[in-house]
Each structure stands twice: as C-alpha cells, then as structure tokens.
Image (spheres, rainbow, N blue to C red):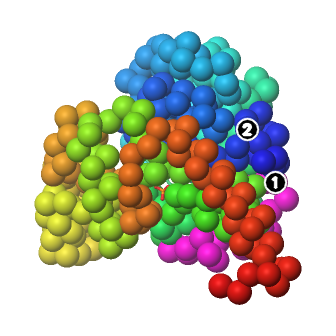
Amino acid sequence: MKTAITEMFGIEHPIIQGGMHYVGFAEMAAAVSNAGGLGIITGLTQKTPADLANEIAKCRDMTDKPFGVNITFLPTLNPPDYPAIVKAVIDGGVKVVETAGRNPSEVLPYLKDAGIKVIHKCTSVRHSLKAQDIGCDAVSVDGFECGGHPGEDDIPNMILLPRAADELDIPFVSSGGQADGRSLVASLAMGAQGMNMGTRFIATKEAPVHENVKQAIVAASELDTRLVMRPLRNTERVLTNDAVERLLEKEKALGADLKFEDIIEEVAGVYPRIMMNGEMDAGAWSCGMVAGLIYDIPTCKELIDRIMVEADQIINERLAGFVKGTVSA
Ligand SMILES: Cc1cc2nc3c(=O)[nH]c(=O)nc-3n(C[C@H](O)[C@H](O)[C@H](O)COP(=O)(O)O)c2cc1C
C-alpha cells in the first residue's frame, strides 16, 4: 500500500509504532521496522543522551530499514537535556522524529536543518494546526481512546480524524484505538494516511517487556482502562489495578486540592518495575481501550502482515462488494 506516509518515511506499510516509555527500546523499533512499519525508540527512556546514542546504534545494527526516535516534552520543572537528546538523534543519522507533549518549536529548526522528518503527536485539531504552522511534516492525531495522554478535550477518533482531515493540509495518521485491518481501513476512510499503534505493539513477541504485561493486555477488555491525573490536567489512560484504584480514591478524597506529591507512590518510577519486573500492581501504566481488541501475542511481522491482508480484503472484497451490490451482509 502506498500513502503519503509510506512515501514520506520510506516504509512499506502505513503503520507506525508510537514511542512508549520502557517499551520503545531498539528491539521493539527494529522488529516493527523489519516488518515494514516504522519503529520508534523512546528517547526519554534512555537515562542519558549517550545511552540514547548507543540505543540508536544498536537499532541500526538490528535493521537496515528506517526507524524513528520519540522526543516527549514533559510537564516538569527539571526538563531533560533536550539539546543533547536532539544532537544524539542527528548524530545517529535518524531520519524521523516523533514529538509529543507540547509543540516542538524549540527543537524543530535543528531537526529540519538535519533533514529529519518530524511527525508531531497531539490530541486536538488546534494543536495539529499549530504543528502544521510551525513546519512539522505530519501529525499523529491521538483520540480519546488512546493509551497514554489523551489530553483534556475527550474527542474520540470517529470525530477527531474527519475533523483533522477537514482542517489539515499536511498528512496525518490516526492514533489511539487502532489494532487491526478494520482500524487501518477506517482510518484511511476518515482521511488519515496511515495509523499509529501503541498498546497493540506491546502484545507482540518482540516487545521487550515482561510476559505479565503482555498477558495483562490480552486479558483486559475495553472496560478495563481508567483516566488518572485529570485533576492535575495531566490526564493519562492506564490499565486498572490496585494502585490505580488507590490513586483514584485519593483523587476523589482530595478533589481540587490534589497535588502530584499525593500520588507520587502510584506514578513515579513505576515503569521499570512493571515493564521489566512484571510487578503488575506497582503503579499506573499507560494502556489503551484497544486492549479489548487484542486477543493474541503475534510477532510484529505476523501482526503487520495480518493487518495488511485484512485491510486488502475489506477494501477489495467487503466494501467493493457493497458498491457493486454483490454482497448483502
Ligand atoms: C505503555 C505506554 C507508554 C507510552 N509512552 C509514551 C511516551 O513516552 N511518549 C509518547 O509520546 N507517547 C507514549 N505513549 C503513547 C503511544 O505512543 C501512542 O500514542 C498510544 O499508545 C496510542 O494509543 P493506543 O495505545 O490505543 O494504540 C505510550 C503508550 C503506552 C501504551
């Protein structure tokens, strides 16, 4: 399949693996890229810019296909060393960067000067337009369903994607709630040029996370995520567990007085314990509603091939049948 996104990033299939904290290591990104999608290393999971440089080099050893790096701008008083992170990306010869968190205007000129394509992930039409205005090449439009940070507008992709299509001139991919060939065809129908998946890629053989995490996603239904940190305007969609229910009790009890320090035990430093040690009740970790559509743990190649075959069948058989009047159900 050829779309503006496959052409822009030099990939075979219009499928991107979004940056994921403590998941987006070289193994994950290389597996997705080797399967014909665009794998993405999560920049901030690496403790230092030098570690990121090593992870990029490791990924390059594992694939000769294009891969990207995610740079997330965190709402924190002690920001990571973004200039050094950008330098590691440029020096590493990376050709695609996914930005997220807030608009990437402070790093964009350096990335563009280095010939890097920038896809900005955001959760609203207005932020997508801002990304277009400042010179991003593409946008990843992240709906309310998504795992991670859905923003505060709560607009699901059924509305958000066609709205983005109505407003944007640059290409965009759908993000949030995408899992299979149906997701891809629906995204394309609503104006996207491809799709970005997070949660679905965690439940793959190559995802470098503890088996408990993969099993938790397969076991979860679409009813099992919760929104946390809404009172802090830093909403995150997470899989429910004991720590999350405790956190929500605190949010309820403290109301508008809630401070980050009140929930630090449930959110700070929990990713390595969950993703690497498989301590599933250690704290809140991002997971999308799409868990309800995830039933197995294939390899990345099996997953992507299956999506492309299914998409082809839907377009050329099911939908074409409707148009020709040869299919009645
Ligand atoms: C465990 C996990 C960690 C994530 N960490 C990040 C991150 O560090 N930076 C980022 O931009 N997005 C992050 N995301 C969001 C994903 O890149 C992607 O936008 C999201 O998962 C899409 O929704 P889906 O899970 O329904 O596919 C994370 C998502 C998950 C599930």
Give the residue at mark 2: 12
Query: In the image, is residue 157 part of the stretch drawn in magenta?
Result: yes
Q: Is residue 319 visible?
A: yes
Packing grade of label 2 (10 A; few <14, some 14-19, many >=20) is some
Kind of residue at disc 1 = Ile
Image point (60%, 63%), residue name: 183
111 is within the stretch colored magenta: no
Displayed quadrant of residue 232? bottom left
The residue at the point 15 percent across, 51 percent down is 281
Residue where numbered disc 1 is placed: 170
Residue 80 is situated, as x and y percent measured from the top left of the image, at: 44, 31
Give the Cα separation between the discs numbered 1 and 2.
20 Å
Residue under the image location 32 percent in, 36 percent down: 209
The magenta region covers 153-174
Residue 21 appears in which quarter of the rendering? Answer: top left
Three-letter code for the amino acid on which mark 2 is drawn:
Glu
| Residue closest to the far front | 326
x, y (%) of residue 77? 39, 42
Residue 179: % across, % down: 52, 58
Instruction: Say which quarter of the image contains residue 191.
Output: bottom right
**Relative to residue 329, is residue 187 depicted above or below?**
above
Query: Mark 2 and mark 1 in contact (Cβ < 8 Å)?
Result: no
Q: Secondary structure at mark 1?
A: loop
